[in-house]
């Protein structure tokens, strides 16, 4: 029995968005959904209890980081990642390829795998499809990602073609190495950059291999938003209706809505937690830099339209004070609110899909948030 199954509930009549359910060994979640990122086995400054309280159902963690520190053997000895970090919801782990390219130098890509330098100790390391699968098996994540190459943006068509062909061969090797079908689901990652012919080839290759779900990779790497939306316009329709579709690394409110409209079910991004730690909050009226002096005597909540625990109990003046004094509690408050804001946004997207009005919702949200698109 597959560990991960997808149930299509409804498609929005106004857009290409769809409401679905993903069943995992650690619970079921509705989609479209946002997944908070917990790279080092913690969603920075949040406790698992707070994540549960705010409605998070699935979080992300990183194979590369946990392999380096504390080591997959220690996580396995703890009984796996869920036990180690005391998180009972679902966990998805990225496979490490992207992190190697975005964090390490001295990278050599070969057919066998990637040689690189540990970005902390400087020692030489090697990661292959088989090794990435072994580490994820030890971590015990519910959803594992195939080992892929995410080429830089932009990339020549010739390079991208060779890269897609190798990523397809690596995907095959990941499937062969994946031996816990009943406990862990494996998603393939579609590459191909902005080239429709290569996206078609990548999707066709991966769909012939029958993964539990499909990610659209190679995006949110510096390309303009209209390029991302164009790639999604011709890529998501290629993917099967009965499997989850995951857009990697996307997390700004406008991109979440535009990705859902184009048929994406799952999103992750470090944005909400990263900007929170420098005192920037997402609100229904746009971004608010709460450390700004103009909020020093502002005793209103971060977002008057937000019903989160932070907005009910704390003021901009107090949070600004904490951030200015570099008090950890201040970062906890901005992080909690930002995550709650995106989780609630996706709940509103799901409601709009049920009522066939996601296009109207987009227009109203964009206008209030201040996105310049009409
Ligand atoms: O093709 C991909 N393959 C596997 N993991 C990814 C993660 C990704 N994360 C982003 N963007 C978000 C970022 C996070 C840090 C720097 S960019 N784009 C991504 C693309 C990929
Ligand atoms: Zn709030």
Image (spheres, helix red, strand yellow):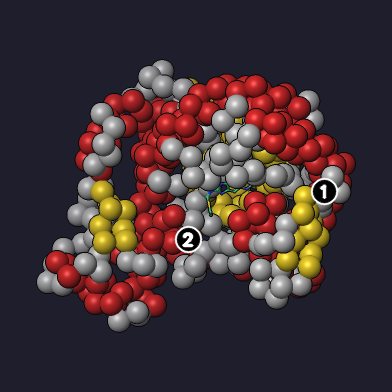
The percent coordinates of residue 6 (x first, y second) are 63, 33
> In the rendered image, which residue does mark 1 sit on?
110
Between 22 and 40, the one lying in front of the other is: 40
Between 211 and 292, the one lying in front of the other is: 292
Number of the label disc, if any, that sits on residue 51 = 2
Residue, x 70% and y 31% (percent of image)? 158
Residue, x 65% and y 54% (percent of image)? 101
Element carrying mark 2: helix
Between 152 and 189, the one lying in front of the other is: 152
Residue 198 visible, this angle = yes
Element carrying mark 1: loop
Calculate the distance from the C-alpha at mark 1 to the C-alpha at mark 2: 40 Å
Q: Is the CB of mark 1 within 8 Å of ligand 1?
A: no
Residue, x 35% and y 80% (percent of image)? 327
Front disc: 1 or 2 = 1
Q: Crowdedness of circle 1 by 10 Å Cα count: few (<14), some, many (20+)? A: few
Determine whether 252 is above or below 103 in the image.
above
Number of the label disc, if any, that sits on residue 359 = none
Determine whether 299 is above or below 228 in the image.
below
Residue 244 visible, this angle = no
Q: Earlier in the sequence, mark 1 or mark 2?
A: 2
Q: Is the CB of mark 2 within 8 Å of ligand 2?
A: no
In-image side of 329 versus 148 (left or right): left
In-image side of 75 versus 44 (left or right): right
Number of numbered discs present? 2
The percent coordinates of residue 253 (x first, y second) are 37, 43
Quadrant assignment for the N terminus:
top right
């Amino acid at each position: 029995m597959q560990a991960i199954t997808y149930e299509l509930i409804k498609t929005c009549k106004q857009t290409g968005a769809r409401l679905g359910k993903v069943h995992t060994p650690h619970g079921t979640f509705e989609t479209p959904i946002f997944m908070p990122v917990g790279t080092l086995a913690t969603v920075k400054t949040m406790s698992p209890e707070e994540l549960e309280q705010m409605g998070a159902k699935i979080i992300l963690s990183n194979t590369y980081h946990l392999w380096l520190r504390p080591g997959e053997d220690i996580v396995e000895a703890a009984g796996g990642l869920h036990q180690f970090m005391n998180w009972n919801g679902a966990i998805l782990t990225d496979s490490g390829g992207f992190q190697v390219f975005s964090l390490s130098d001295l990278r050599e890509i070969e057919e066998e795998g990637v040689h690189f330098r540990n970005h902390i100790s400087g020692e030489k390391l090697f990661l292959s499809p088989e090794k990435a699968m072994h580490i994820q098996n030890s971590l015990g994540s519910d959803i594992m990602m195939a080992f892929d190459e995410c080429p830089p943006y932009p990339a020549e068509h010739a390079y991208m073609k060779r890269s897609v062909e190798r990523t397809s061969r690596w995907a095959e090797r990941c499937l062969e190495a994946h031996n816990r079908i009943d406990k862990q689901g494996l998603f393939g990652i579609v590459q191909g950059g902005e080239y429709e012919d290569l996206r078609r080839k990548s999707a066709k290759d991966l769909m012939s291999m029958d993964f539990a779900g499909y990610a659209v990779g190679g995006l949110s790497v510096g390309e303009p938003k209209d390029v991302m939306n164009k790639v999604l316009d011709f890529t998501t329709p290629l993917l099967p209706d009965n499997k989850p579709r995951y857009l990697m690394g996307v997390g700004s409110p406008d991109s979440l809505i535009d990705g859902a409209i184009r048929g994406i079910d799952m999103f992750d991004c470090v944005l909400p937690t990263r900007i929170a730690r420098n005192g920037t909050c997402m609100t229904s009226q746009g971004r608010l830099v709460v450390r700004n002096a103009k909020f020093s005597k502002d005793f209103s909540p971060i977002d008057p339209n937000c019903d989160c625990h932070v907005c009910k109990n704390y003021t901009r003046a107090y949070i600004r004070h904490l951030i200015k004094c570099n008090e950890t509690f201040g970062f906890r408050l901005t992080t909690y609110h930002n995550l709650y804001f995106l989780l609630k946004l996706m709940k509103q997207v799901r409601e709009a899909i049920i009522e066939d009005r996601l296009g109207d919702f987009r227009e109203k949200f964009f206008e209030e948030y201040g996105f310049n698109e009409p």
